[in-house]
Amino acid sequence: MTKGFFNVPVPVNEPVLSYAPGTRERSLLKEAISTAYSEQADIPMYIGGKEVRTGRKVEIRPPHNHQHVIGWYHQGDKSHVEEAIRSALAAKEAWEALAWEQRAAVFLKAADLIAGPYRYKINAATMLGQSKNAYQAEIDSACELVDFLRFNVKYMAEIYGQQPPVSPSGSWNRVEQRPLEGFVFALTPFNFTAISGNLPASAALMGNVVVWKPSNAQIYSARVIMEVFQEAGLPAGVINLVYVSGPEAGDVIFNHPDFSGIHFTGSTSVFQDIWKTIGNNIHKYKSYPRIVGETGGKDYILVHQSADLKVASTAIVRGAFEYQGQKCSAASRVYIAQSVWPEVREMILADLKTMKVGPVEDFGNFINAVIDEKSFNKLSSAIDAAKADDRLEVIAGGNYDKSKGYFIEPTIIVTRDPYYVTMCEELFGPVLTVHVYEDEEFDKTLEVIDKTSIYALTGAVIATDRYVIEKATYALRNSAGNFYINDKCTGAVVGQQPFGGARGSGTNDKAGSMINLLRWVSPRTIKETLSPAKDYRYPFHEED
């Protein structure tokens, strides 16, 4: 075993490539997309370092081109979850005992592989499997995932370096950070490849072993992540990737005595059901499981009359419609002052006229497909209901088509009622609802925003008046875990804006920060007495 106090490489955010016409990266990405389209991937589960194929194949079709099959994944069942748990527990002792710098090296190498030789493969997989355009894939599956892996190593080193400040003469006090007893369950979403990679990797970096179940809609890029981890030297059994139904996975995992924690991103309803199940089964576990989750959001942008109007319109358009409004942080409700609304409205409509909708391989398309038919049906129903409601005005979009892909036009609804259903309930798509308030009712609007939704993930205020900015920042302090001033409410960057919300939006354990990694360790305090006592008596026993 090596000896030394090691300094980890200083992390720097991975540069975002432009993919502009004529660039090398544009050519290489298009080549990777073409290769992926020309092949049909046969995607196994990865359990105990082995590829597991069941023969029960499920087709994978791009959301923007659902007539085309780009691969199959092998569906598992409860027996595979049980096997994954056994493999994880079998790997636990050796992985936990491995020197921390050796664990760090695995994930630092994985970061370099994604930044380098795997960059275009993982971006292409994200584009085809999750219908992201080139830029959205680049900032997600390449840059953000690389940032998670590199910054987490820095955070781990800082956690290990946090030691008691005082060791009195004759003693030495120290703290070690132990992995959790048992295994961690990573349940990951479709919308960010980076999140899907980080949820199992962050727990594993801290010495834990993991059973990982991705969203079915993200399996196509999840297998690339596993390929990277394997090439980086991740030992067999440390992370086990299974494709099973949620109820089957939960039935095995949440009844297992060695279940030690869940790292989750997904819907609020699913997370609440998981929490309830864990609570009901709490007597079955060896330890109290760590429950870490980031769920939904009904994210807002508040535009004051002092706002720079071009800043406001750009923040609204980007915040609401990038990646078809399928970011947890996407703007889905806007509150805007009456005096500035007419001009901002025209700016927004002018921008929307330039947005093209279509498949990802055409780099001219800003808007691509929503993730699946279930999402398409929910969104189209909401749009139809809005168009049929005389109290509302649909000023943009309102059209949809699923003949070739699940395409929803960017749609804007204007309502006089700040509590209309689409101002309150999460839709998770390119549907934005705008409420225009009277300028003098700004303070009342702050109260409305704070009380409208069960969620508290992201929000933004657009204003130039510093008193207004201070007032909004304080009044809305509990309404968003990530709050933006003169910017859109999306785009948190690892190492810059730790991400997470409270209320119905999750446990606010801030992915991309030390806070999150602390949930995957259990500290042990060690006191070593160098000059031990040899007499039980204290001075007060002495007679006068």
Image: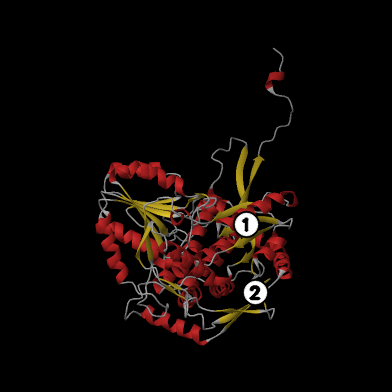
- The location of residue 138, given as percent across then percent down, is 42, 71
The residue drawn where x is 43% and y is 84% is 31
99 and 327: which is toward the camera: 327
Q: Residue at x 68, y 81 (%)?
A: 55
Q: Which amino acid, mark 1?
A: Ile
Q: Which numbered tag is attached to residue 543?
A: none
In the picture, measured across the screen, residue 535 lies left or right of residue 152, that is right
Which residue position is annotated with label 2?
Answer: 45
Q: Residues within 10 Å of mark 2 (few under 14, many from 20)?
A: many
Circle 1: element type = strand
Disc with the residue nearer the chain's start (2 vs 1): 2
* Residue 82: quarter of image: bottom right
Q: Mark 2 belongs to which amino acid?
A: Met
Image-quadrant location for residue 16: bottom left
Left or right of 228 on screen, residue 344: left
Query: x, y percentage for residue 370?
Result: 47, 70
Secondary structure beneath dot 2 equals: strand
Query: What is the x, y in percent for residue 101?
Result: 56, 61
- Residue 275 versus residue 245 in the image, above or below: above
Q: Is residue 15 left or right of residue 273?
A: left
Instruction: Please count the marks in the image.
Output: 2
Picture quarter with the C terminus: top right
Q: Which residue is mark 1?
A: 262
CB-based contact (under 8 Å), mark 2 and mark 1: no
The residues tagged by marks 2 and 1 sit, at their Cα atoms, a distance apart of 20 Å
Q: Nearer the viewer, residue 39 or 29?
A: 39
**139 over 447 or under it: above or below:** below
Q: Is residue 178 visible?
A: no
290 or 208, which is in the foreground? 290
